[in-house]
Amino acid sequence: MDFESIQVEYAERRATVSLNRPNVMNAMNFTMIQELAQCFELLRENKEIQILVLKGEGKAFSAGGDIKMMLTSGDPKDFEQIMSYITRLTLAFYQLPMITITQIHGAAAGLGFSLALASDVIVAEENSKLAMNFIGIGLIPDGGGHFFMKERVGTPKAKQFIWKGNVMDGNEALKLGLIDHKADDGEIEAMVDQIVGKFLSSPILAMLETKKILHAQKLSELENTLKMETEAQLRMRKTEDHLEGIKAFIEKRIQQFKGK
């Protein structure tokens, strides 16, 4: 299947999915969200692939949701459709019968960071910039961001990270347990290849059974989280703080939130 905003490559038992909007730091517009959902759903049925590597073309993994998409999707029905595809891609990715590895260089923010956190293994360059920064535009994490952040660090820390929206480099993210491996800048491809090789030379079928068992126990919680995120995100879209956050981002100024 041909895609417009992503690339999919196969090599033996490995698939590589590349976010491919490098001119906008792989910001995730509706086309990319749709295509990722379709791609992951197709991969769920592929019995030959045992490793999936997810990465971004150009200077970043993903800057998150496309701000232009947020501005043009004023109709609640349009936004509901976007959220339905975010739910589809998240559930399909979580249930992939393969080991998922996200390879991060540059920015991994917002929805892009939620998707990265959904991976089994996260590798980031030392000077990458990772942020669950929905708060800056008066929104909440989506794409299961609440669920995956809590899985990584626990509920108290997850709340703090989400509320602050701080930008972290690879060193800080590793110390906090938000990534699994840190690579020197420019060395991430080699490190990921080594990790893939180690998995493929291991009893990977047993590993995949473990993933299936553990994820099955959590699936209903993820589904409920995605439902609640959709409902809450629709409410947040109507707030004055969200409009102020978007305007401040475009005008490159400090936000003036009022709690409304």
Image (spheres, rainbow, N blue to C red):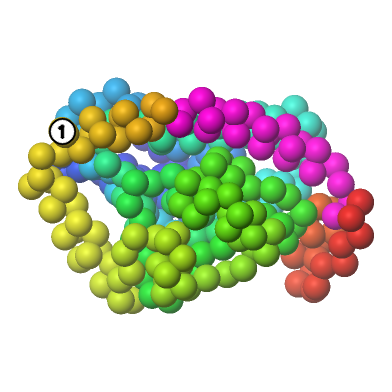
- On-image quarter of the N terminus: top left
Q: State the extent of the magenta-drawn residues as a range.
A: 218-241
| Residue 130 % position (x, y) | 51, 65
Q: Is residue 106 visible?
A: no
Residue 17 placement, left or right of 64 = left
Residue 9 placement, left or right of 11 = right
Q: Please give the residue where the numbered disc 1 appears in the rendered image.
A: 205
Q: Is residue 225 magenta?
A: yes
Q: Residue furthest left?
A: 201
Which amino acid is tagged 1? Leu
How many numbered marks, from 0 up?
Answer: 1
**Residue plotted at (15% across, 33% down):** 205
Label 1 SS: helix
Q: Is residue 139 magenta?
A: no
124 shown above or below 243? below
Q: Is residue 79 visible?
A: yes
| Residue 176 % position (x, y) | 46, 65
**Residue plotted at (66% across, 37% down):** 229
116 shown above or below 129? above
| Residue 238 % position (x, y) | 85, 42
| Residue 197 % position (x, y) | 13, 53
11 shown above or below 123? above
Q: Quadrant of residue 203?
A: top left
73 shown above or below 46? below
Residue 135 placement, left or right of 105 = right
**Residue plotted at (52% across, 33% down):** 222
Q: Quadrant of residue 209?
A: top left
Nearer to me, 56 or 104: 104
